[in-house]
Each structure stands twice: as C-alpha cells, then as structure tokens.
Amino acid sequence: MSTTVNRVTAATILLAAGCGLTVYCWPVERGEHADYSQRGPLCGHWAALRCCEVLGAPLSIEDIVALLPARRDEHSLGDLAGALESVGFRVKGRRETPRTLAAAVPCIAHLIEPDHFVFVDRCDEKEVHLFDCQGRPFYESLSRFSQKWSGYVIRVRRPERDEVLPASLAESDRHVARIQFDSLYVCEGVASHENDVTEFEFRFRNLGQTDLRVGPIEAGCDCIHAYGPKHAIGPGEEDVIHLRYRHQGGGEAFHHSIKVHTNDPYMPMVMLQAVGYTGTFAVSPTKLYFDNVAVGESRSAMVYIKSDRDRALAAITRVSASAKCIDIRLGDRGGVPAGAQLGGIVGSREAGVDMDVAEVIFQPSMEDVGQETYQVTFTTSDVDHPTISVPVIAHAVLPVRAFPEVVSFGELDGRSDAPIERVLELRAYADLEFEIVRFICEGASIAVKVDGRDSLGRSRIRVVASGADLSRIKDREVSAIVRMSGQDEEFAVPIGLSWY
C-alpha cells in the first residue's frame, strides 16, 4: 500500500485556478484501494457547511459533498477555497499568527494535531469559538488552539455588493421577491446565569424586484418564540426575524431549527439555526438514584462533567456533598461510556474538549435509613456558572429485613384463644452475620422465637398468637431487636402483622 506524506514539513503552494489566490494544501495518508465514494462527510465538508451557514448561503451537507467529491487524497485548502468561491464568497489563503487570527475570522483553519480542518467564527485574546471535524461547536483557549494549528487559514467574506447566495441562483429571475439572510446560523455563546431568555436576530434583505413576504414561521418547540415582519418588504429593503429562547434548565447547550416560509419562488422555505449554551458545563446524569442500599454497604455511580471550554478557561475547583453519607472522588478525565447523554454541549476529545469524571459514593448509616434527597455540588472557576448541583435521591434500608415483611393471619376471630402459628425469616443483605437479641411487641403477649438458622445465615422465626392476643396489638407490628456481628449497636427490624 502506497501513501502520501501527511506532514506540513513543506506546504505546497497552490494557485487556485481562475482566482489568483495563494492557498496551501497538505496531502493526507490514504491507501490505494480505499473506496472513497462511500465515505461520509469529512472534516472539510463540515467546515465548508458551517462557513456557508454562518455567512448566509443556504446549502445542505449534500450540496457541499457534491462540491467537494471524495477522492484518494484528503481535501486541501485549495479545494476548499475553490468550492467556497463557486458558492459566491471572496476567499483568500493566508498565514496568520495567534495575534492576528481575530482579524481573519470567519475562516477555515488547518490543524496538524490531529490533521484536519475546522471553521472558526470568532476569536479574542483568550479563546476561540470553532466547529470541530464533525461540525459541532465548542470553545477552546487560544493558547491551546495555537499548539495544534499550522497557522494557515482560508479567510472567507461575503461579496461586497448585494448578491444572492449561492452564486448559482444569482442570475436567476430578479423580477420576483428574493430573500438573502446575513446568517442562517447564529450562536449566542454562553448565556449569563442571571438570564432565562436568550434573544436572536436573523437579518435579511429583499434582493428581488417585487415585494417579499415572510411567514409563517415554524419554531417546532414551546421553548422558542419566533416572529417576523407582517408587512411586505419592498425591493432593496431589509428587516429582521426575532427569536426568543427560554432556557429549559440544566448545564447544556441548545440547538434549534426554525422554518421560515417566504414568497421567494427560489427559496420558499429557509431553515434558520439558533445555537447557544445555557451553561458552560454539561453533566451526565443530571440526577443520581441509589435504591435499597443497606446500612454498612456502599454503592457508587459515575458523574461525567463536560465543558464547552478547555481547562484553561473553566475547571472544577472543589466538590462537596450535603451529608456525611455521600463521598465524592474526582478521577482522571476519561471517555464517555456508551449510552451516556451529555446534552448539547458537544465536541470531541480529539478536538480538545475537557471532561471530568467524579465517583459519587453513598454509604448510609443508621441515621440515614429511609429515602432522602441530597445534593452534590461542583464548584467551578467559571464566574458566570460558579456551581453545578446534582441531586442524589437515595433510599437506605436496614441491613436485616423480615421476609415476608408482613405476616398474614388471614380471617381472625378476635375472641378466640386458639393459638395461630406463622413462620417467617430474617435475612441480611450481602450475607452479613447478625444476632437476634430479643423481640418487642406492645399491647399483647405473643410468642416469638428463633427456630433455627440455615447455612445461608437466614434465621427462621415462629410467631404464635391467638386471635384475642392479636386484636390487642398496637399498630399491627412487632420488632426484632438485632445486632450485627462485631458491633455493639442494636436496631429494630419491623415485622408487620395483618388479618381481616
């Protein structure tokens, strides 16, 4: 199998045909006999798609794949530049530095560790907002991004004069209404924890020669309220579609699509995308459940905390629990298990997204018997979202239980002195050794005695009483006073009694 070199030891300078642009390409390691036509969308496809959406060109991933067909060598920056220029954008290959990257966005950047393309739509002196090799948004510190960035980008800009995008529609009939959005994909970043609503604006213009009408607008979710102009938009005029997203809680991102219907015959329906983060962190699971955990035992569950920023920008600094029976251990960052749902804050570990793993341990004492809701709190370095709370719903039980828990005496004659006998067992969770100290029965005299113990540690109990005795029992319950082997503490195991 022969391969080409996948290293930027010497960037190949490519003069894009017909546009006089200097861009750079990097061959990628591929086998001779691979079936390239069967590949799914690659990183270059997703970078080009997000670029088109952010800059207002309504193309689908299928359209992008048609512009950039799969082939033996991976796409180069030259290929991407040619495809985006055919859409109608002005493109230019450049070499940038971390200090000049902010002036170059929006752009497609080439990474070398790992080797792929990403779309960068904003940047400041601290962090970069980008879309990874599968088109998913996340934040990364500028310093970390710079470590794996080759320095090469394709700067992408809209046409200077008003033109319909994609360019294939530019020469179509202008004697109709023609809608052109500034952006089809708006990301508002992380919302402040003080706000429960995030607002979006999608600006558009009528580039046709007749009136443009917008509506209806389909939000498809109760958390979204979208509205646009009810009046006609004249030729050359512009307006805006407003969208208000009401946060649904949880440290997750949201990504909603809105369908906008128009009287543009070439674009009768436009899909708008509203994206943002209701928190810097996503937690999975959002609640923990511990059911029937015996005193003396412990049970644990994992909590995965994924940040849309890397550790230089947001980190877990402290963990605490609302009760002594809850212990938390922060572990090494690891992968997401199959089936774990991390909400909408997405990104891959290959792209540098941090994730913390915490083991939450529930170890109840006698004081914790019953069901209770506790709180596990993660303190973060993010000033907008300083804490993350995960409820822990736990049910602690005694280490010994009666089986059955309620002994039935059937139909009872409350005046009869004839003895009635029933048999039950006391069983310990996890085969723990225990000792029966005594029995307590308030309100009547009932014969309760231990009648042997089997090899599994189960104690056989005989309950003998008359109907007259049973009718005088308060609360229809007796208690076995039990002590676990090697311990001094005694506790009561309830044994329910029933009759009719």
Image (spheres, grey):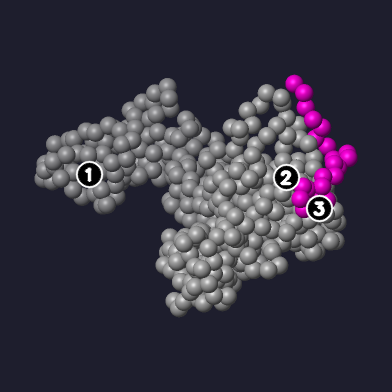
Q: Label 3 vs label 2: CA separation? A: 14 Å
Helix, strand or loop at label 3? It is loop
Can you say whether 18 is above or below 483 in the image? below
Quick one: label 3 or label 2, which is nearer the N terminus? 3
| Residue at x-position 62% and y-position 57% | 167
Is residue 407 or residue 479 the one in the foreground?
407
Instruction: Find out whether the residues at labels 3 and 2 contact each other: C-beta distance under 8 Å.
Output: no
Provide the residue designation for mark 1: 498
Can you say whether 476 is above or below 10 in the image? below
Q: Label 1 vs label 2: CA separation? A: 81 Å
Q: Amino acid at mark 1?
A: Ser
Q: Is residue 35 left or right of residue 473?
A: right
Measured from the top left, where is residue 373 in percent x and y?
Answer: 48, 56
| Residue at x-position 72% and y-position 49% | 82
Provide the residue designation for mark 3: 20
Measured from the top left, where is residue 440 in percent x and y?
Answer: 34, 45
Q: Which portion, as a residue range, is magenta?
A: 1-23
Measured from the top left, where is residue 492 in percent x and y?
Answer: 40, 45
From the image, state whether disc 3 or disc 2 is nearer to you.
3
